[in-house]
Image (tube, rainbow, N blue to C red):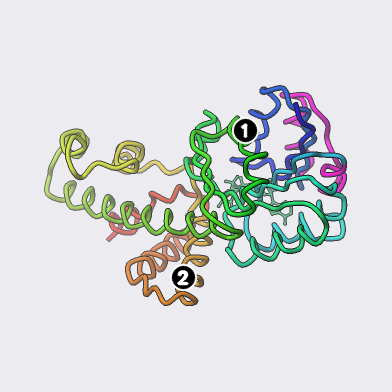
């Protein structure tokens, strides 16, 4: 069993770190809002650190799951950041959805300091984190990946090395481009069906047996019909992710016309006060019209 650190105990990090503790690892946690870390230690045992550097000191594996590029920069390269104390030969696995650029930068910086950095964004949402069934797409050094894989597997259903540093984040971008297209299609279909007077729960039950089925239809169709969005993956995070996709598209020449349009729809949801609504709330702008 390894000594591990976990930085960022949000919706995702809290249960992910919990799986590591349940598997018998010695876990030290850090969270910016200390009360969450205290709650985690009360539930799972382990140790609480006052800074990311304190958490990372002496750990063989350092995990992080924070919000965005700037947050990741603070918890790694900041004055109290984990990189100041990560041991030579250790591995940092970052599960934040961030840019490929920062993943490459942190991997290079880690290599200079004698440890490895893997970008490992996840999909599967809050329930995937709680059930230990996330999909993890990893970029970075293959030997470090092989050493980290069995530990990551405590909270994952699939852990795959996609290529060099940044390849995990690029794969997550592909994932998000797919997801928002499906969510917008589902929103339009449900709005259309309700206006047509159909029993939409029955309609989704029927068509989910065929080619229209999707994770979104199975997990979000019913709640979209019921106008419930107080759970799941926040609209603010989705807009952040689409911003990362569009910036990468501007670099690699992908036009992303649908993604660009839907990013604008999410901006409208934020203006409606829905920043923390689940990202399936796209239907709300159609229902209000
Ligand atoms: N939720 C999902 O379904 C889902 C699915 C796939 C991927 N993701 C990605 O996973 C990441 C985390 O998502 P989440 O839903 O767990 O978010 P969240 O609940 O908002 O948690 C974010 C975590 O990051 C910490 N944090 C943010 N900024 C920080 C900073 N500047 N310094 C130190 N700590 C900071 C927060 O600390 P505080 O407690 O102090 O705020 C919190 O622990 C995001 O990149 C998201 O896009 C989320």
Q: Which residue is mark 2?
A: 246
The x and y percentages for residue 253 are 42, 77
Would you say 175 lies left or right of 15 here? left
Instruction: Describe the element under mark 2 as helix, strand or loop.
Output: helix
Q: Is residue 128 above or below residue 120?
A: above
Label 1 Cα crowd, 10 Å radius (few <14 / some 14-19 / many 20+): few
The x and y percentages for residue 76 are 77, 56
Q: Is residue 108 visible?
A: yes
Q: Is residue 127 visible?
A: no
Q: CA distance from mark 1 to mark 2?
A: 33 Å
Would you say 264 lies left or right of 75 here? left
Q: Which residue is mark 1?
A: 150
Residue 48 lies in the magenta-colored region: yes
Q: Tell me the residue at 26%/54% (across/down).
A: 185
Q: Quadrant of residue 34?
A: top right
The segment highlighted magenta reads 33-57
Q: Quadrant of the N terminus?
A: top right
């Amino acid at each position: 069993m390894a000594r591990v650190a976990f930085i960022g105990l949000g919706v995702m990090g809290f249960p992910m770190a919990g799986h590591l503790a349940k598997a018998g690892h010695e876990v030290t946690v850090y969270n910016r809002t200390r009360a969450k870390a205290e709650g985690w230690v009360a539930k799972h045992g382990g140790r609480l650190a006052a800074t990311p550097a304190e958490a990372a000191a002496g750990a063989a594996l350092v995990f992080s799951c924070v919000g965005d590029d700037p947050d990741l920069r603070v918890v790694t390269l900041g004055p109290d950041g984990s990189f100041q104390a990560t041991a030579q030969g250790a591995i940092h696995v970052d599960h934040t959805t961030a840019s490929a650029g920062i993943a490459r930068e942190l991997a290079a910086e880690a290599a200079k300091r004698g440890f490895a950095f893997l970008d490992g964004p996840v999909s599967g949402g809050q329930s995937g984190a709680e059930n230990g069934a996330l999909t993890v797409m990893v970029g970075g050094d293959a030997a470090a990946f092989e050493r980290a894989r069995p530990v990551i597997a405590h909270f994952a259903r699939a852990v795959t090395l996609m290529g060099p540093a940044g390849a995990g984040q690029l794969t997550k971008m592909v994932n998000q481009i797919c997801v928002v297209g499906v969510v917008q299609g589902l929103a339009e279909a449900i709005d259309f069906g309700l206006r047509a007077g159909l029993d939409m729960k029955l309609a989704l039950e029927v068509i989910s047996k065929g080619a229209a089925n999707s994770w979104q239809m199975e997990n979000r169709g019913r709640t979209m019909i019921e106008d419930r969005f107080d759970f799941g993956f926040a609209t603010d995070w989705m807009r952040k992710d689409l911003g990362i996709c569009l910036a990468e598209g501007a670099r690699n020449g992908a036009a992303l016309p649908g993604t660009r349009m839907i990013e604008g729809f999410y901006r409208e949801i934020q203006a409606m006060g829905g920043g923390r609504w689940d990202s399936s709330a796209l239907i709300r702008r159609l229902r209000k019209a």
